Amino acid sequence: MVNRIVVGAHYGLSDWLIQRVTAVVMAVGSSALAVYFLLHDDMGYDRWTALFASQPVRAFALLFMLSLFYHAWVGVRDIVMDYVKPAGVRLVIHVLVVLALLLYSIWSVQILWAI
Amino acid sequence: MNKRRPKHLALHLIQLPLPGFVSILHRVSGLALFLALPALLLMLQYSLRSISTYTVLMEVLSQPLVKLLLLGLLWAFLHHFCAGLRYLAIDLHYVHSLKQARDSSKIVLLVSLLLTMLIGVKLW
């Protein structure tokens, strides 16, 4: 039997879970969009905007994008932790990535609610 | 014992196993998709904002070089998607043996390439 004393904030575990939950959200969303494309051969500006003008689609699109940004944060953070060793450089990259993803989130709301 | 003894690695014989290859491509494709995010968001914005921005976007996307870049991004997405599904399957204990690990890696590589070619042909 392993008597391991578990300490810490466990944020690694919650990131592991969030990475998978956001992945499933995006897998469902992109599959649904692919099926929509397959069913509608006459895709043009009118059909495309009508799709995103629907409130549930718009809400799910935002959920998809926020999932994407959180997923990207966990992934990029893991890559940076693996390859960038100097603490200062690592911190700067982390801050830039977080700021970029926050800006993308605001931008996504603007894009989706401008229709 | 001398712990600083030289190691003789047969570098020409050592290669990344297939699941490792899929794994590093999962990383590379993920990073590529992250770096492409501003361009992808801009494309979504242009496609939705008005019929004139939509027309501009379609014109830009019809350039051969842009199409090639998009095809690369499409592969990155499809590989990341398929390799991600494989990881979810592993989490759910669907992969038990080395053979299954290798076979599923092969499937991921083949399916993502095949889908990229199919969609690429359709879009061209």
Image (spheres, rainbow, N blue to C red):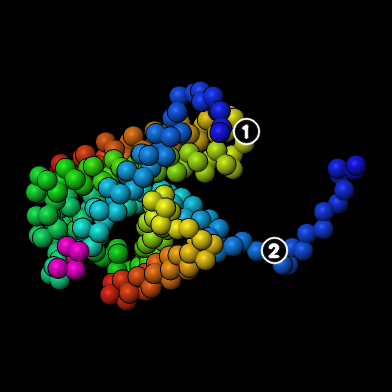
Residue A88: give x, y in percent of width and height.
58, 29
The residue sitting at 38% across, 51% down in the picture is B92
Question: From what the image shows, is residue B89 above or below residue A112?
Answer: below
Indicate whether residue A12 is drawn in magenta.
Answer: no
Instruction: Tell us which disc is closer to us: 2 or 1.
Output: 2
Residue A93: give x, y in percent of width and height.
50, 36
In the foreground, A28 or A55: A28
Question: From what the image shows, is residue A83 above or below residue B117?
Answer: above
Secondary structure that dominates the magenta span? helix
Q: Residue furthest front?
A: A1
Tag 1: amino acid:
Pro
Gap between marks 2 and 1, in whole Å? 30 Å
Residue A18: give x, y in percent of width and height.
36, 39
Query: What span is in magenta?
Result: A35-39
> Which label is found at residue A86?
1
- Could you tell me which quadrant the N terminus of chain B lies in? top right
Circles 2 and 1: CB distance less than 8 Å? no
Residue A42: give x, y in percent of width and height.
12, 69
Disc 2 chain ID:
B
Question: From what the image shows, is residue A12 above or below residue B76?
Answer: above
Disc 1 chain ID:
A
Tag 2: amino acid:
Ile
The residue sitting at 86% across, 51% down in the picture is B6
Residue that carries the numbered disc 2 in the rendered image: B14
Number of residues whose C-alpha sits closer than 10 Å to that of mark 1, classed few (under 14), some (14–19) or many (20 or more)? few
